[in-house]
Amino acid sequence: MTAPHPPAEGLVVTFYGDDFTGSTDVMETLEDMGLATLLFLEPPTPEEIAAHGDVRAVGVAGVGRTMSPEEMDAELPPVLDALARLGAPLLHYKMCSTFDSSPRIGSIGRATEILRAAVGGGEMAVPLVVGVPQLGRWTAFGTLFATFDGDVYRLDRHPAMTVHPITPMTEADLRVHLSAQTALPTALVDVAALDGADDEVASRVDASLHHHDGIVLFDVDGAATQRQVGLALHRLLSRSVEAGETVAVVGSSGVEYALGAAWERRGRAPEAAVRAPGPTLVVSGSRAPATQRQAEHALAAGFTLVDLDPVAVTDASGGDAARSAVAERAARALAEAERVLVFAPPPVPGARPVSGGELSLALADITRRTLDLAAVSRLVVAGGDTSGHVARGLGIRALRVLRRLAPGAPLCRALSDDPRIDGLEVCLKGGGVGAPDYFVRLAELGADALVADSPR
């Protein structure tokens, strides 16, 4: 069978990412498929997109994963409506591949309802694609599995996700998990239905989509099922092109991986020139074990640690002074050593509890103040919520991929109206992403690679 191909011109995909690091994951995947992508922090105008004539995909990085349903009702409709008006045949609500959600926080069910309304598809089946084997996530018979330290766990037995501080996972059957978040029925296209000749699978899949008006979850447990899911998405996309409509899809970057498998366009994005190694600032709000190991490796390799007191920097009365002091220390360290790690330690027993949102906002303010005081050519932010607040706080308008470093955590170039931020090399990294030497490799990138002229 000859592989299908994406539309020859115009936007192919628009997407909303429910956290920042997941949004860069989608952008990187689309670039690997040969679809030039711009990731914005607010919905772009058609004129902004037209200024980048090669763009085939556009996304908006959001924070839906931390919202209540009521906050989603206020925040998401204008953004999703604006993306739908751009006219791409596929609009993807991107959520984390570990399905971080609950009825009260980051509800994927409520987000799906809002997405359907945005595309005018109140009776339309919405495909849900979660599995992405390339990132160590699999779905089989509706059950989600994920890796941790090299082993595979059902998600309700996963060492990290079962103790997630905001959305702990107690149910790995995604249909059961979703049933607490939406009244929409959830059907399943399982691995057995996806097994067989292409025309037989297509007949079964299309019948399922046609006969259901809620959510249709697709299993992805390997290359064969991923390709079949991609073929199903391609058929939906092709029909939406013919009808001049937009199809809504919910899922992880497994949506884009599946399309790439169907189109046989899963490769590597062209490598763009990066700056020579220079002042590198790493800001971490993540307490994930992978980030802890990266911090330890960076300090052993010579990074200067600037630690902070989470209680002090989030204090209602003295927090401003405490954040200013941390920024001044970071700026001095950058001038002396060029590689600096601003790291929030775990909470001290008995201290005032500090929420992830409070800490993320404080780190965003510290980052902005540090960049006001010191020249930085490369910024790394670890943690999804922290990444979102830092990007907004710096006035970043959009991001473009420069270089792949680890799946889901590319190095990007910032686009901004602020000349101090425009052109800054930025990486927004999920807490669990990357090898232990990630921070060190990023700081050294450019020493023996394509190097661009630096305006700094």
Image (cartoon, rainbow, N blue to C red):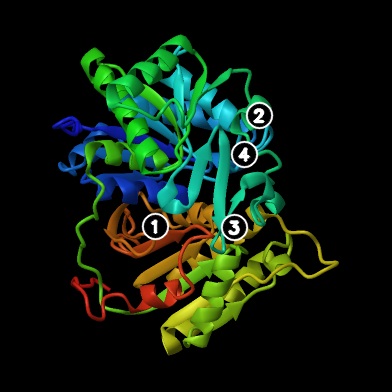
Q: Which residue is mark 4?
A: 101
In the displayed structure, does residue 158 sit left or right of residue 258? right
Q: Determine the secondary structure under disc 3.
A: helix
In the displayed structure, does residue 455 sit left or right of residue 309? left
Q: Which mark is residue 360?
A: 3
Front-most of residues 181 and 197: 197
Q: Is residue 93 above or below residue 409?
A: above
Q: Determine the secondary structure under disc 1.
A: loop
The residue lying at 44 percent from left, 70 percent from top is: 371
Q: Residues within 10 Å of mark 4 (few under 14, many from 20)?
A: many
**What's under tag 1, amino acid-wise?**
Pro
Q: Is residue 188 above or below residue 146?
A: above
The mark nearer the N terminus, 4 or 3, is 4
**What's under tag 4, amino acid-wise?**
Ser
Q: Determine the secondary structure under disc 4.
A: loop
The residue lying at 46 percent from left, 32 percent from top is: 191
Location of the C terminus (image quadrant): bottom left
Q: Which mark is residue 433?
A: none
Q: Which residue is mark 1?
A: 407
